Amino acid sequence: MTEPTEHRPAPPGEGAGTTPDAVRCSDAERAETEAALHVAVGEGRLTMAEVEERIARVYAARYRHELAAITADLPPVPDAVTGWRPVVAAARRQVLTELATLLGKGGTVSTRRRLAIALVTLAMVVFAVSVAVLALHGIDGDGFEHHELGRE
């Protein structure tokens, strides 16, 4: 029994834009390409409209070379870095952005936003100083005996 023609895969070389050595793309490769597009929009290389249009092309693509064409104008996405380095780098970028906003270098920003940034920054500084004092003073399970509190 033969398959209906709409479900039968076209052999390589048939169809628009294929080559004899075309390799079909997998769902994982589509997801990888979509992730690269999300990185590009996060970096400001693409607009949301461009990303939406390209993601539609990603899921319509059948061959690897079609996926490669979608991201050809973007720099390669580096392999994922594990550990604390990406977290610290992201926190550093955020702190610098917020500091620029507080100093008025971030364009027009509402007073409410500046106040919120200042309060969060103050809370973070107080927390960091408290942790540093506790760490330097010593936190142990012996309680307050070394302060001689409660002794008579």
Image (cartoon, rainbow, N blue to C red):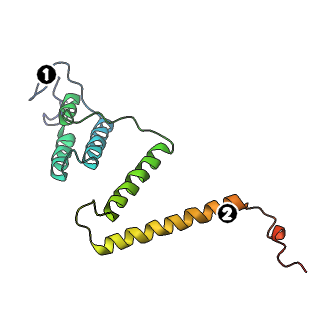
Find out whether the residues at labels 1 and 2 contact each other: C-beta distance under 8 Å: no
Q: Looking at the picture, how far across and down is residue 123, in whole percent?
A: 49, 69
* Nearer to me, 148 or 57: 148
* Nearer to me, 49 or 142: 142
Is residue 9 shown left or right of residue 133? left
Closer to the eye: label 1 or 2: 2
Name the residue located 31 percent from the left edge and 43 percent from the top edge.
Answer: 35
Name the residue located 46 percent from the left edge and 48 percent from the top edge.
Answer: 88
Mark number displayed over residue 13: 1
Q: Residue furthest bottom?
A: 152
What amino acid is labelled 2 in the image?
Leu
Name the residue located 33 percent from the left edge and 59 percent from the top edge.
Answer: 100
- Residue 50 against residue 71 in the figure, above or below: below
In space, the residues marked 1 and 2 are separated at their CA atoms by 70 Å
Q: Looking at the picture, how far across and down is residue 40, in whole percent?
A: 26, 44
- Residue 77 against residue 89 in the figure, above or below: above
What amino acid is labelled 1 in the image?
Gly
Assign a secondary structure to mark 1.
loop
Q: Residue furthest left?
A: 16
Assign a secondary structure to mark 2.
helix
Question: Based on the displayed image, in which of its 4 quarters is residue 133 positioned?
Answer: bottom right
Q: Earlier in the sequence, mark 1 or mark 2?
A: 1
* Nearer to me, 112 or 28: 112
Number of other residues with Cα within 10 Å of mark 2, as a class: few under 14, some 14 to 19, many 20 or more? few
| Residue pointed to by mark 2 | 134
Number of other residues with Cα within 10 Å of mark 1, as a class: few under 14, some 14 to 19, many 20 or more? few
Question: Based on the displayed image, in which of its 4 quarters is residue 9 positioned?
Answer: top left
Name the residue located 28 percent from the left edge and 49 percent from the top edge.
Answer: 42
